[in-house]
């Protein structure tokens, strides 16, 4: 299953990634931001895009996930403490963009993770899924709106959306990371003040992260859940004062508990009966042990949780930030004031000079500030220039005369018109330039997104191609291994067929039996002692269940796990009938599936030609390359055969014994005729080492050779075991 996880880094996200990876799902991740901040577990592919990016649609089309999980209430990309109003808007914008992209591809299920925060009012009993939400605050309102949006998409667009509400989920926090669980807040308060504040009239329930993920996973993988909304809750009622006492017990006697109960009590416990009726589950982490783990961890790493808050750096940083903002806003006004002084002096000098008397320095001053800073400074500089002009005029006339002179107002209007016009043009040029820059940045971002998505698709394409070619279950890989039989001689193919079977079926225990007659099969080669469990000779027709399956040309699967039967078995047929029986042992029960049975059928078909051809060739050796008038192989043919058995024994694929028959006469026809009833159908007689007669006994060892030697002796021939290697 292709799983698409959406959310910031954190304990919950890593737990979801671990769960999906362990169950063999292919996991993709959308981080929600462009930079590489945050630590995540390994995923198949990671996308660093904000939720409101237009590339989200391309990502969905590229992945086409079977399951999309939006962490919602537990997404660490949102700062709900300082800028809740803006974050609520950003949250809903991102969710709408994700949902619209998901609905367009019409593929898979979308799961939205919510929390108990959507219920803000006090309740007297358990809260069922049908209860209307009552959010309090921007965060709770955003979560509730997210639920409503998912429900609307399900009704109007037909999208398979699902909502999971978790009831006060908690976990062992990361070092220095803030969490919103009640046990975390109590531990943090105790570490800072050695006191825990608790409301004795408040009751709730808590669920550990591990239990929550296990319960949610059952909903994720079910093909057709009965409902679209489930509560994930332990339903274990715990009072806030009771939890505080537990924290005090774990953290030590130096901690005090203060009861802050006022007014009417509150109860907030989600009812999970709907979930439990459909998905039976047992809670493994009860709040006593879970909260103790949280307290112990925070005590061990207390420095990472309290240093930053207690240092006071947060308030100092805010003050310094406001100072810098005010200073930046005052810079243009300071520039106007500083520049006004030289232009004021130049205007006084120009008034007394016949050469530059007609040069208006105030107009130049206003134009300069308008060009540099725009309309705002045009107005401010024009006011300063007007004040300077009036001040100079009052040297020759009274202030009353200056105010009554209409030329003064004409000059001021002219100054403001020129300043505002130039400032407006400057502001418009800046706006157009910024707009163009934004558009270029947007298009560049789009191009970068397309490049990133394309690079991701290329990497996945190469990855899939490599998997198709190199995966152990691919036809290419199966053919590559099975075709390796062609490098062996006809005498060796039957031995190495077991080795090839072992590789292709990914088991260390494989055996190949040759059918000797209508009822019995002889072990020809095996890869381990476990694969020889049935012995060297079996009456396969007596194995009724297996025989019925093989006779019907089907793969036998030992579903009853009978100890004396192979886990899987298959037969190789020719026009003459059943030729070989392939047996597998020690395959885990998880792999005893229809897919594995089909793979064994394909493997048997691929190695059939080589094995049957080799078997026929060996029959030809026995019938054509023998001493005239006997069934004794000549020296060349018997040497090749003995060497094949020797090499197979060295590799643990076969057992055999080579017996030298101590016959005084060289009448091989007479000897072979006498010993015909003493040897088995799968045994061989042949000539080695300058005319001496030997018997090769497959699947025989020194421990069980006694009976055969006795039979040879009863026929009038003594024999001895040849311990020397055959070259």
Image (cartoon, grey):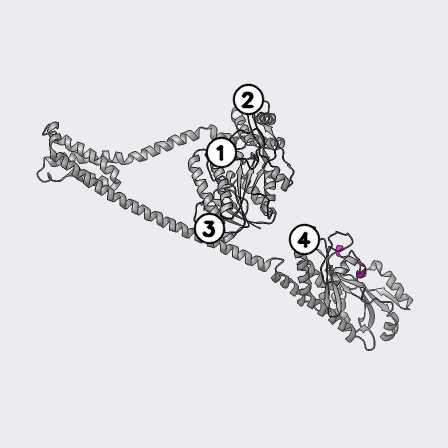
- The front one of 684 and 70 is 70
- The front one of 202 and 398 is 202
| For residue 483, above or below residue 58 | below
Query: Of circles 4 and 2, which is in front?
Result: 2
Q: Which secondary structure lies at badge 2?
A: strand
Query: Of circles 2 and 1, which is in front?
Result: 1
Q: Which residue is mark 1?
A: 135
Point 27% across, 46% down: residue: 429
In space, the residues marked 3 and 2 are separated at their CA atoms by 52 Å
Of the numbered discs 3 and 4, the one sitting upstream in the chain is 3
| x, y percent for residue 714 | 91, 66
Of the numbered discs 4 and 2, the one sitting upstream in the chain is 2
Please state if 371 lies on the left or on the right of 556 as rendered.
left
Of the numbered discs 2 and 1, the one sitting upstream in the chain is 1
Q: Which secondary structure lies at badge 1?
A: loop
Please state if 419 lies on the left or on the right of 599 as rendered.
left
In space, the residues marked 4 and 1 are separated at their CA atoms by 49 Å
Q: Which residue is mark 3?
A: 57
């Amino acid at each position: 299953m292709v799983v698409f996880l959406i959310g910031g880094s954190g304990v919950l996200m890593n737990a979801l990634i671990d769960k999906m990876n362990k169950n063999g799902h292919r996991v993709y991740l959308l981080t929600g931001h462009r930079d590489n901040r945050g630590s995540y577990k390994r995923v198949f592919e990671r996308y660093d895009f904000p939720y409101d990016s237009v590339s989200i649609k391309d990502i969905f089309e590229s992945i086409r996930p079977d399951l999309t999980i939006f962490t919602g209430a537990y997404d660490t990309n949102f700062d709900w403490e300082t800028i809740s109003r803006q974050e609520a808007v950003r949250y809903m914008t991102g969710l709408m963009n994700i949902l619209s992209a998901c609905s367009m591809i019409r593929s898979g299920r979308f799961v939205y993770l919510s929390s108990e925060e959507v219920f803000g009012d006090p309740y007297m009993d358990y809260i069922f899924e049908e209860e209307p939400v009552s959010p309090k605050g921007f965060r709770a309102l955003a979560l509730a709106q997210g639920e409503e949006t998912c429900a609307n998409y399900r009704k109007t667009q037909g999208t398979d959306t699902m909502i999971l509400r978790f009831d006060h989920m908690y976990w062992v926090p990361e070092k220095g990371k803030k969490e919103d669980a009640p046990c975390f807040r109590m531990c943090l308060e105790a570490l800072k003040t050695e006191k825990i504040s608790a409301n004795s009239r408040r009751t709730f329930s808590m669920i550990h992260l591990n239990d929550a993920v296990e319960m949610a996973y059952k909903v994720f993988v079910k093909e057709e859940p009965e409902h679209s909304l489930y509560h994930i809750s332990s339903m274990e009622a715990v009072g806030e004062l009771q939890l505080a006492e537990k924290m005090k017990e774990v953290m030590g006697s130096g901690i005090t508990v203060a009861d802050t109960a006022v007014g009417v009590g509150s109860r907030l416990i989600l009812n999970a009966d709907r979930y439990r009726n459909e998905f039976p589950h047992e809670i493994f982490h009860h709040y006593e042990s879970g909260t103790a783990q949280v307290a112990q961890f925070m005590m061990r790493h207390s420095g990472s949780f309290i240093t930053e808050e207690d240092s006071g750096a947060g308030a100092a940083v805010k003050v310094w930030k406001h100072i810098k903002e005010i200073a930046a806003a005052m810079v243009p006004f300071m520039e106007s004031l500083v520049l006004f002084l030289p232009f004021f002096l130049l205007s006084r000098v120009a008034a007394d000079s016949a050469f530059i008397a007609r040069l208006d320095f105030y107009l130049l001053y206003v134009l300069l500030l308008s060009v540099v800073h725009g309309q705002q400074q045009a107005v401010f500089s024009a006011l300063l220039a007007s004040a300077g002009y009036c001040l100079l005029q009052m040297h020759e006339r009274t202030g009353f005369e200056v105010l009554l002179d209409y030329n003064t107002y004409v000059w001021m209007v002219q100054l403001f018109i020129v300043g505002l016009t130039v400032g407006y043009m400057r502001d418009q040029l800046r706006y157009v330039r910024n707009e163009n820059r934004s558009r270029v940045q947007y298009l560049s971002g789009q191009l970068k997104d397309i490049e990133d998505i394309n690079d991701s698709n290329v990497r996945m394409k190469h990855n899939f191609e490599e998997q198709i070619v190199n995966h152990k279950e691919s036809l290419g890989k199966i053919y590559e291994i099975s075709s390796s039989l062609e490098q062996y001689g006809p005498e060796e193919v039957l031995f190495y067929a077991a080795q090839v079977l072992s590789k292709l079926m990914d088991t260390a225990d494989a055996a190949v039996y040759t059918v000797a007659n209508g009822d019995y099969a002889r072990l020809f080669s095996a890869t381990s002692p476990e694969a020889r469990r049935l012995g060297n000779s079996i009456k396969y027709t007596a194995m009724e269940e297996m025989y019925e399956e093989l006779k019907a040309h089907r793969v036998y699967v030992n579903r009853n796990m009978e100890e004396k039967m192979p886990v899987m078995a298959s037969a190789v047929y020719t026009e003459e009938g059943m030729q070989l029986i392939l047996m597998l042992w020690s395959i885990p029960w998880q792999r005893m599936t229809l897919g594995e049975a089909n793979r064994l059928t394909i493997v048997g078909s691929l190695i059939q030609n080589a094995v049957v051809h080799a078997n026929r060739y060996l029959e030809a050796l026995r019938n054509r390359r023998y001493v005239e008038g006997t069934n004794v192989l000549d020296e060349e043919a018997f040497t090749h055969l003995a060497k094949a058995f020797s090499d197979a024994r060295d590799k643990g694929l076969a057992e055999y014994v080579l017996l030298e028959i101590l016959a005084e006469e060289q009448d091989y026809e007479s000897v072979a005729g006498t010993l015909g009833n003493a040897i088995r159908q799968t045994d061989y007689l042949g000539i080695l080492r300058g005319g001496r007669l030997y018997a090769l006994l497959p699947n025989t060892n020194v421990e069980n050779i006694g009976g055969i030697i006795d039979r040879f002796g009863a026929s009038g021939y003594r024999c001895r075991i040849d311990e020397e290697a055959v070259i």
